[in-house]
Image (cartoon, rainbow, N blue to C red):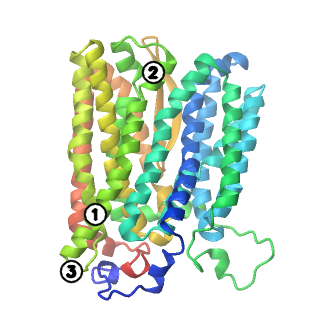
Amino acid sequence: MASEASPLLTSSSDGDKTAHEVIYDRFTRRRKRWIVFIVSCAGLLPKLVAASFVPSLPQVAKELHSTHAAVSLTVSLSTFATAIGTLVWAAYSSFYGRRTMYLCGIPFLCIGSCGVAMSNSLRSLLFWQFIQTFGCSGGLSLGAGVIGDIYKLEERGIGIGIFLGATLFGFAVAPFFGGVAAQYWSWRNLHYSLAVWGLLELLLIYVLLPETSHPGTLGIDKLKQRRQVHIAWVNPLRSLWLLRSPNLFGVMLATSLALITDYVLLVPLAYTIGVRYGITNKAIIGACFLPNGLGNFIGAPLAGRLSDVLIRKWQKKRKGVWSPEDRLRATWIGGLFMVPLSVGVSGLLTTYVGGPIGLLLNLLCLFINGMGVVFVLNPIGSYNVDVVHSQSAEITAANASVLIICRDYRTRNSLTYLPFFFSGVRSFILSVATALVIPSIERIGVAWTNIIVAVLALLGQGIIFLTIRYGDRMRASVDVGFSTIENN
């Protein structure tokens, strides 16, 4: 049981590698990079599946002779499927292994995508989209688990950074691809393309991805007797129970407050930037998401490397003593400066600066916000894996940033799509934020709405400060099976 005096904060003084450290040498550096590439491709799928479908909703409603509101039920159902799938694949990966769960999940995506493409009724569409999103929903939690398996503590940040950057980039490009498909192609062909991608990913994983779980740690390996085909029950909701830890709950809350800035900038994008600068084409509106995704893509590995450097720096400063909260210091640059400044300045630009200059400066703010948000998300994601390393997939599932798209919101003849991230308590926080964005802009304006959200992001950094300062006491107050330096 971890406490204030536990080995959680101690490091071996000798230079010899322990048996646990040798586990991380199973794969060469080149092989690790290849593994990260494979799981990053899988991590892109949930975001592409969810976000690319939304711009096609009017087209789907027309072809199926249904109403837009009725077709939007597919999005609500996919929210439910993603919530279930994320927890299920993470929980079972600790029993059967990461590779096995990938091989079990992706066929659901392929079959579901073909089913969606061939649907001729709303009922059929609802059923197949549930299958589709359930199958690919494990991409983020399984990928984080894989990276926690292959990278040791002081290298883990850059690994998760590359993975997170690639997966979040999917969030930005998906609306663009979906908008292009809706404007110039066919929503059915789009889903056939997703099925082909799934098949290629399945082949890649089957041929090239090894099982990364540490030897002897899987639930099935611990069974004294088992059948040739052993089916076990694993409670998928147990992941959420990890959030009773004040450390884990606190950083989850700080992440949510940073993510709200994404909501304020991206949720009403067609209504704010689109209307202010006269953009009506769906493909161009989707392209306006790209700077934010590019910021995610560039910022995530930089944030990961910075968090690794800080872990080594502070461990050396304490003469070998490791405090997991040192990694959270890497959030300062994003949480204190990039995130609040980008969202606040964007609100002022949209309100007072018109023309091409205002648009370009807004796109720059979207880029900086994308970088800033991952400078908060990445160190926190790595911190979660550090402190509950044996349950890395589960804690990622509990905090998973799974992209969902909720129902469209019509206002002043402008169609606005509302993306939100679903995960336990964070779902409540962000769904409330999503619901309030448009009414707040209509009541007090873009500038004041963005300034209020910038202040909330700063409050999140206050929570991070308290976690860094009192992290050892917070861990000691509620033990959820925290990892130590010896098993990390």
Which residue occupies the foreground of this view, 80 or 204?
A: 204
Residue 309: x, y in percent? 28, 63
Residue shown at the point (33%, 64%) measured from the top left: 247
Secondary structure under tag 1 reads: helix
Between the C-alphas of marks 3 and 1, the distance is: 15 Å
Secondary structure under tag 3 reads: loop
Disc on the earlier residue, 3 or 1: 1
Residue 79: x, y in percent? 57, 41
- Kindly identify which residue carries mark 1: 309
Which residue occupies the foreground of this view, 420 or 244?
A: 420
- Kindly identify which residue carries mark 3: 319
Disc on the earlier residue, 2 or 1: 2
Is residue 272 toward the left or the right of residue 353 in the image?
right
Q: Give the quadrant of residue 292.
A: top left
* Tag 2: amino acid: Ile
Badges 2 and 3: C-beta atoms under 8 Å apart? Answer: no
Which residue occupies the foreground of this view, 142 or 205?
A: 205
> Is residue 394 shown to the viewer in this render?
no
Q: Residues within 10 Å of mark 2 (few under 14, many from 20)?
A: some
Quarter of the image where the C terminus is located:
bottom left
- Kindly identify which residue carries mark 2: 285
